[in-house]
Image: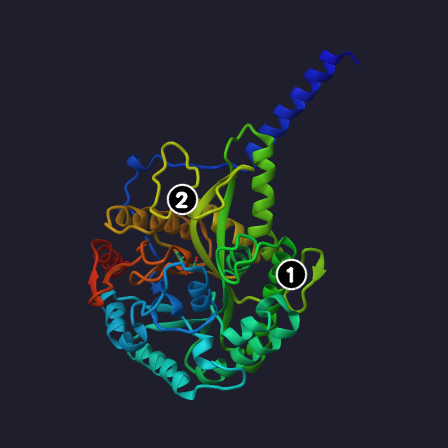
Amino acid sequence: MDWWVWGLASLASYVLIIIYLSWRNPEPHSTWQQIDLEQLKFPSNFNWGSATAAHQIEGNNTNNWSSFEERTGIEESAKACEHWQRWREDFNLLSELGVDSYRFSIEWSRIEPEQGEWNEAVVSTYSKMVDDLLQRGIKPMVTLHHFTHPIWFEELGGFSKKENLEHWVNYCERIFDVLSDRVKDWCTINEPEVFSIMGYFMGLFPPGRKSIRKTLRVMRNMMSAHALAYRSLKSSRPDTRIGLAKNVTLFDPLRRWNLVHWITAKVLNHLWNGIWISSIKRGRMLGRRVEYAKGSVDFIGLNYYTHVLASPFMPRTIEVDLPKRKHQIMTEFGYPMYAEGLHRAIEMIAALKVPIEITENGVADESDSLRPEHLHRHLLVLSQAIEEGYDIRSYHHWSLMDNFEWAEGYKLRFGLFHVDYDTQERTMRESGRLFKEIIANN
Ligand code: GCO
């Protein structure tokens, strides 16, 4: 074949591949200026809520994170929102908003500070929290692991060792025994993909490792941890609903004509989303069987924030912003606002064929100038998805109040309530009032 024929044929194939990929993987963007954002319609039994996590609000926890904070010199969580002392007042904030549901997490390191030593007073405080919520007519949704665990567990190798999973199941059972008569909705693990990739590949979360091999092992063990907990808890109380909170980040090619960007996006999507969904569907992850994983969710929790425009040269630190499309609004976290993606995320996890709970969605926005728009756009997309027939039962806004944003510390503020960290005063933001109004009208 002549070189030019060969060249032309290659070019034509390249173009065809790109056209095919673009057609199969659209990246829709709405013209928001032309959309009436007030058009929200939710079913009458829809649950409105907000979400927090123990280490981000409680204060003075001693766990894998606090020791990582000390070791690396990142901003320390320290007293956080002093929620451990102020939880009753904070529950007043929930009542003020008028939510039906509250997602919070239990701090394993408080319950079992030393291996085999259980702190009953702490268990009883969590139990009182549950009673208090129920008295207010608010359904508790409890997360058993939201990035943190006791130091002794970390020292044993945490989730990087399969033999440690029995300690995890022990803890789950313990807390489940006490609360499951009243708590019906449970998330075993929050964002196992974030935990394993940030902690073992990016090194930005504890234990701060950068090892591909370890990352893959932790991923598989996390899936296994979820499945073992599901199986054990479900067998003791079949009337509970147990799921996990999955962060769905979408990956789109930075340049849609660049095959390398497509491949990067596909690989990242597979590791971040694909393998988790398929392991629940098929009981296998990364080529190996994960015992009890198949069908191990009664619902799937969706944490949705953004899409990532992928290329081989992406920032690997938190100091640099991720790329965005020209028209997109950048959030303070350094990723773009992309409400249209919520629909794609829903579509993706609907493959599990179980009810969907939005367990997190929100934005870092200190001045509250973006949050009302953010809330409106996401709720509009959500209400449309429900109208199309997706079985979505709740929306939990992240977060009730400003709190400790992990590696980013306190500078990122996600709250419907502003927190003054000097006085611990909470003040409802404009967006809090908007959320309250939306709840009341829907
Ligand atoms: C996570 C967690 C939350 C975050 C929230 C905002 O996604 O990291 O579930 O703890 O605070 O997502 O980034």
- The answer to whether residue 358 is visible is no
Residue 88 placement (x, y as % from top left)? 26, 77
Asked whether mark 1 lies closer than 8 Å to ligand 1, one says no
The residue under the point 62% across, 55% down is 278
Against 42, residue 134 (above or below) is: below
Q: How crowded is mark 2: few (under 14 residues within 10 Å), some or many (20 or more)?
A: many
The residue under the point 64% across, 69% down is 161
The residue under the point 60% across, 48% down is 270
- The answer for how far apart the CA atoms under marks 1 and 2 are is 28 Å
Residue under circle 1?
217
Label 2 SS:
loop
Image quarter where the N terminus lies is top right
- The answer to whether residue 305 is visible is yes
Image quarter where the C terminus lies is bottom left
Against 106, residue 364 (above or below) is: above
Using the image as rendered, state which of residue 223 and residue 335 is in the foreground.
335
Residue under circle 2?
335
Please indicate whether residue 399 sits to the left or right of residue 261 in the image. Answer: left
Residue 420 placement (x, y as % from top left)? 22, 62
Label 1 SS:
helix
Residue 163 placement (x, y as % from top left)? 65, 74
- Callout 2, which amino acid? Tyr
* Display coloring: rainbow
Please indicate whether residue 167 sits to the left or right of residue 175 in the image. Answer: right
Q: Residue 168 carries which label?
A: none
